[in-house]
Amino acid sequence: MWFTWDGTLLRFTGTTTRYKYTNIMRNPKVTVSVNDPESPYRYLEVRGTVVNIVPDDSGIFFAEIAARYGLPMDGPPSDVLDRVVYVVRPDRTTSQ
């Protein structure tokens, strides 16, 4: 899943029509695992809490994150009206 990190908070994009949204509304605790493709035993796990869900019905955040990952956009995604940004406050990390 694509994300951004501002030094304090993680941000992800999603939609209100997927199970992830339903699950987060039920329990805002999340875990993110990032693996190093060059070293299969190297990883970072972040456990945190979704502290805010911000509408992205203009698709601005989606376009920014898509550009960061090398996907140019020709306009907003087809599900733009359902788009949200999950804002996550990390509570603890594990790494190797």
Image (cartoon, rainbow, N blue to C red):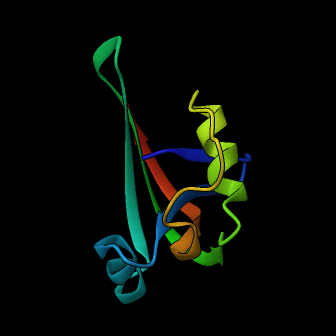
Task: Name the residue at 40% across, 77% down.
Answer: 21
Query: Nearest the camera: 88 or 90?
Result: 88
Task: Name the residue at 60% across, 54% down.
Answer: 10
Q: Classify 30 as above or below 26.
A: above
Please tell me in which quadrant of the rendered image residue 45 appears.
top left
Q: Is residue 84 left or right of residue 24?
A: right
Q: Classify 25 as above or below 17.
A: below
Please tell me in which quadrant of the rendered image residue 77 appears.
bottom right
Task: Name the residue at 57% across, 67% down.
Answer: 80
Task: Name the residue at 57% across, 75% down.
Answer: 81
Q: Classify 57 as above or below 45.
A: below
Q: Classify 43 as above or below 83.
A: above
Query: Nearest the camera: 39 or 68?
Result: 68
Q: Position of residue 48 (x, y in %)?
A: 48, 64
Quadrant where the image shows the C terminus: top left
Q: Position of residue 63 (x, y in %)?
A: 66, 47
Q: Is residue 34 left or right of residue 13?
A: left
Q: Is residue 53 left or right of residue 21?
A: right
Please tell me in which quadrant of the rendered image residue 31 appears.
bottom left
Count of picture labels: 0
Q: Is residue 76 left or right of residue 32?
A: right
Q: Which residue of the protein is positioned furthest toward the top in this rendering?
A: 38
Q: Which residue of the protein is positioned furthest toward the bottom in this rendering?
A: 26
